[in-house]
């Protein structure tokens, strides 16, 4: 029999996903579980559909979208104040669980009272043999994290004992009630992104273990590509994380790295006419320095105007003979792009350039002739330089980016750059290519010049922010 568990699910305009999740949860012992669904002011009829579902649930409706952290905290507060449970299971609304998913998490927790958080092994729903993430590790001084066992074969690790990690994703995380008593609930300042990394790191700092349970399977895709707001949250929230988990002087260099990367990218995007993306990056740094957290701001109408570039005919692809595809969008976008190139230019050699923790997921794509890896945020200036020389030696006549306005700087070292946008697979010529390479030294120089004052501003703000503590950090402050 399962120990008493409260399951907290947050949903926002994902009606069908949350109903599918409820269908899968009916196998649980209802006498020992309470299902709490928090609706973050959905407009797609989610609340009514949840009420009409045959599975009994406690439905809490927020009057506005409070993000992942605010949504989870709504459910966690209710559970801690109104229910009697030993564990609280945080679960994404679009996750797919197995009959023994929760049972295996509890079994791991019961073996060691020092385990504060146990997370499931997240598997790729499109290829269930591959691990997406089994927890992960944080590099505080680089202000980055790395998923554990990304795209490794599940069969090799499914019988492994629980692995100690720095964090587990809130996609499926079982939390001991005693942990909330010790560290409080989620920090609502994050809104989205970095919140589960922060929660796991805080738990470890308080002496609790955080483990990934390989036998607890959850299917959930994570490759959703970039967006303006995702980059905003990643930049702003990484600075918040640094402020909370490093001492005043330890945080200087990591903050400089974040500011330099953010400001350099903002200047680059502005140069390329991507005013909206540039604006969000500037706002991420300004929001942190000003102590503004929560949901990302809405841009002024004039910033939304995107510089249009001439659309190209798909026949243009037939002129390509040696193509490098940068895997910076969602997996489905990358695969569609590769198929389009292969169809338009069957004799072209296609090389896929992807982050090292993503590249294995594309190995089965027969249209790709060669793979090269890069890690833009982690490899440093020497690693980036080595990758540039690799691009120049390969003499690609075309670089292709798929499904997103995000442009990696490496496209400036290829003769021509094409962006394939949206579901209609529209093709645009990009200015980020060799003919615009002269702009890079200017952008880098400006980036260096403005990064230092930006870092000082953020560092000074961090001293105040780290002393304030998180918003609603403990349920006993309600």
Image (cartoon, rainbow, N blue to C red):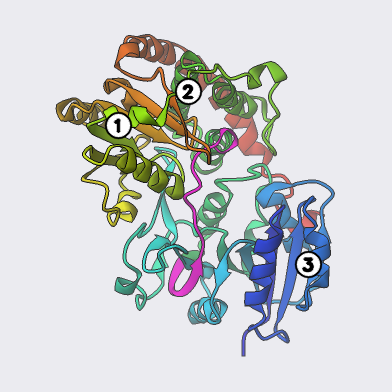
Q: Quadrant of the N terminus?
A: bottom right
Residue at 28% x, 37% y is 345
Secondary structure found at label 1: helix
Residue at 48% x, 37% y is 425
Residue 130, horizontal then vertical, whole percent: 37, 64
Residue at 59% x, 26% y is 280
How packed mark 3 is, by other alpha carbons closer than 10 Å (few <14, some 14-19, many 20 or more), is many
- 473 up-or-down from 326: above or below: below
Q: Name the residue under label 2.
A: 311
Q: Name the residue under label 3.
A: 50
Q: Are marks 3 and 1 in contact (CB under 8 Å)?
A: no
Q: Does the magenta segment cover residue 229?
A: yes
Q: Does the magenta segment cover residue 139?
A: no
Q: Is residue 139 at least partly visible in the picture?
A: no
- 22 up-or-down from 377: above or below: below
Residue 22, horizontal then vertical, whole percent: 68, 72
State the extent of the magenta-drawn residues as a range: 211-230
Q: In this view, does 434 lie to the left or right of 59?
A: left
Q: Mark 1 points at which residue?
A: 318
How packed mark 2 is, by other alpha carbons closer than 10 Å (few <14, some 14-19, many 20 or more), is few
- Nearer the observer, 83 or 264: 264
Q: Quadrant of residue 253?
A: top left
- Nearer the observer, 410 or 313: 313
């Amino acid at each position: 029999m399962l120990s008493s568990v409260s399951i907290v699910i947050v949903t926002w305009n994902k009606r069908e996903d949350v109903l599918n999740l409820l269908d899968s949860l009916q196998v649980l012992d209802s006498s020992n579980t309470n299902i709490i669904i928090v609706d973050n002011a959905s407009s797609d009829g989610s609340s009514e559909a949840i009420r009409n579902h045959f599975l009994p649930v406690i439905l809490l409706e927020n009057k506005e979208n409070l993000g992942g952290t605010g949504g989870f905290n709504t459910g966690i507060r209710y559970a801690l104040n109104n229910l009697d449970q030993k564990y609280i299971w945080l679960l994404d609304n679009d996750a797919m669980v197995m009959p023994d998913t929760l049972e295996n998490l509890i079994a791991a927790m019961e073996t060691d009272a020092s385990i504060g958080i146990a997370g499931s092994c997240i598997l790729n729903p499109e290829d269930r043999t591959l691990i997406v993430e089994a927890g992960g590790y944080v590099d505080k001084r680089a202000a980055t994290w790395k998923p554990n066992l990304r795209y490794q074969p599940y069969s090799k690790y499914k019988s492994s004992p629980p692995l100690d990690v720095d964090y587990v994703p809130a996609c499926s995380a079982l939390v001991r009630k005693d942990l909330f008593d010790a560290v409080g609930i989620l920090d609502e300042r994050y809104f989205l992104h970095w919140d589960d990394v922060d929660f796991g790191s805080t738990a470890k700092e308080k002496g609790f273990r955080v483990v990934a349970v390989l036998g607890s399977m959850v299917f959930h895709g994570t490759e959703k590509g970039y967006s303006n707001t995702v980059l905003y949250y990643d930049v702003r929230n990484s600075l918040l994380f640094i402020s909370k988990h490093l001492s005043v002087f330890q945080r200087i260099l990591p903050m400089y790295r974040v500011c330099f990367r953010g400001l350099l990218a903002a200047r680059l995007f502005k140069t390329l006419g991507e005013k909206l993306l540039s604006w969000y990056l500037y706002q991420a740094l300004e929001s942190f320095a000003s102590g503004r957290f929560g949901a990302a701001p809405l841009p002024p109408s004039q910033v939304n105007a995107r510089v249009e570039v001439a659309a190209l005919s798909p026949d243009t692809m037939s002129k390509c003979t040696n193509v490098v595809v940068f895997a910076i969008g969602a997996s489905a976008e990358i695969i569609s792009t590769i198929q389009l190139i292969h169809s338009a230019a069957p004799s072209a050699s296609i090389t896929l350039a992807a982050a090292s923790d993503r590249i294995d997921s594309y190995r089965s794509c027969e249209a790709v002739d060669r793979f090269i890896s890069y890690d833009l945020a982690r490899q440093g200036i020497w690693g980036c330089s080595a990758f540039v020389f690799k691009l120049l030696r390969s003499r690609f006549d075309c670089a292709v980016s798929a499904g997103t306005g995000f442009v990696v700087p490496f496209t400036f070292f290829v003769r021509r750059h094409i962006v394939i946008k949206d579901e209609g697979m529209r093709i645009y010529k990009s200015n980020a290519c060799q003919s615009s390479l002269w702009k890079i030294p200017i952008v880098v120089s400006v980036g260096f010049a403005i990064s230092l004052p930006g870092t000082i501003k953020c560092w000074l703000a961090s001293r105040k922010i780290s002393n304030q503590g998180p918003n609603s950090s403990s349920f006993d402050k309600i």
